[in-house]
Image (cartoon, rainbow, N blue to C red):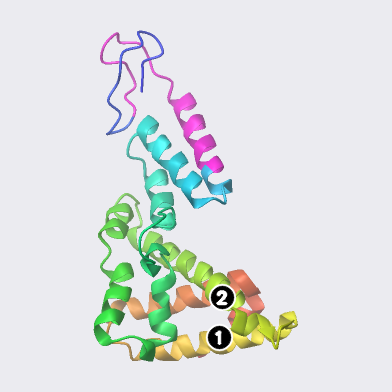
Amino acid sequence: MDCPHCKNSININEGLPLYCPWCGGKLNPDTDEAGLASMLLQAKSETDSVKKHDILIKAKEIYGVRREIEKELLLLGRLYERGGKPDFYRIPYWPLNAIEKPREFSKRDRQKMLDSFFSNPQLMRVAEMYEDRMAFINEYLTSMSEEYVRTFMQNSNTNLYFLGFRRKADDVRSRCESCMIRMLNNLKDMKEIPDDMKTPMRDALIEGFGRVFGEASAAELINI
């Protein structure tokens, strides 16, 4: 960014300094935080993943490496990529399909899919920016579960339609609940998921389901 006083360029890769290294002018941290908050709100409100990514990258150029920006980039995954061969890995929550339908994938593919959650360098790097690392990871897994339920369960043609007719909301929820029960049961015996992450993943799936279908629906899954 440029100093508002002397207009010289300031390196903000490690965050905004309090004073300009060139002229000594004070840089307003309140304005900095307000500007960052505004760009983050704009990014979160943007439904086009390409435009969302552009906003986040611009914010990073202006405000440097900030955990709020890194979190949004992590949640976005590679959804902004266009062209090339079809690649489901662009969808950050798609790999949860390995839990719902493990028999459709080889052991090697299942491991690769679930490593995108449990051996993800970007996730671990961003988590280290937060005081409670595990709380951040849990929230990330919950966000991914919520989007998976919404995209691959609630809006799947199999659960949404029957012979071309739209199913009733309760029918859709019931069918999705059956899918989630299958996921929770599959999760118990999956060797591709570290033992210490099975409970957090289970809790994330249930909470993610509840964010889409309501807390009462999630409560029905707790004893599975």
Quarter-of-image position of residue 78 = bottom left
Q: Is residue 39 magenta?
A: yes
Q: Quote the CA–CA distance across marks 2 and 1.
A: 9 Å
158 left or right of 15 in image: right
Residue 95 seen in render? yes
Q: Amino acid at mark 2?
A: Phe
Tag 2–tag 1 contact (CB < 8 Å): yes
Q: Position of residue 26 (x, y in %)?
A: 37, 14
Q: Between 119 and 132, which is closer to the camera in this rendering?
A: 119
Q: Quadrant of the N terminus?
A: top left
Secondary structure beneath dot 1 equals loop
Question: Residue at 35% of width from left, 63% of height from top?
Answer: 134
Q: Between 117 and 84, which is closer to the camera in this rendering?
A: 84
Q: Amino acid at mark 1?
A: Leu
Secondary structure beneath dot 2 equals helix
Residue 222 seen in render? no
Question: Residue at 39% of width from left, 57% of height from top?
Answer: 77
Question: Residue at 61% of width from left, 74% of height from top?
Answer: 155
Q: Position of residue 102 (x, y in %)?
A: 37, 87
Image mark for residue 221? 1
Question: Residue at 32% of width from left, 87% of height from top?
Answer: 190
The residue beneath circle 2 is 209
Q: Is residue 176 magenta?
A: no
Q: Position of residue 213 (x, y in %)?
A: 64, 74
- Image: magenta residue range: 16-42
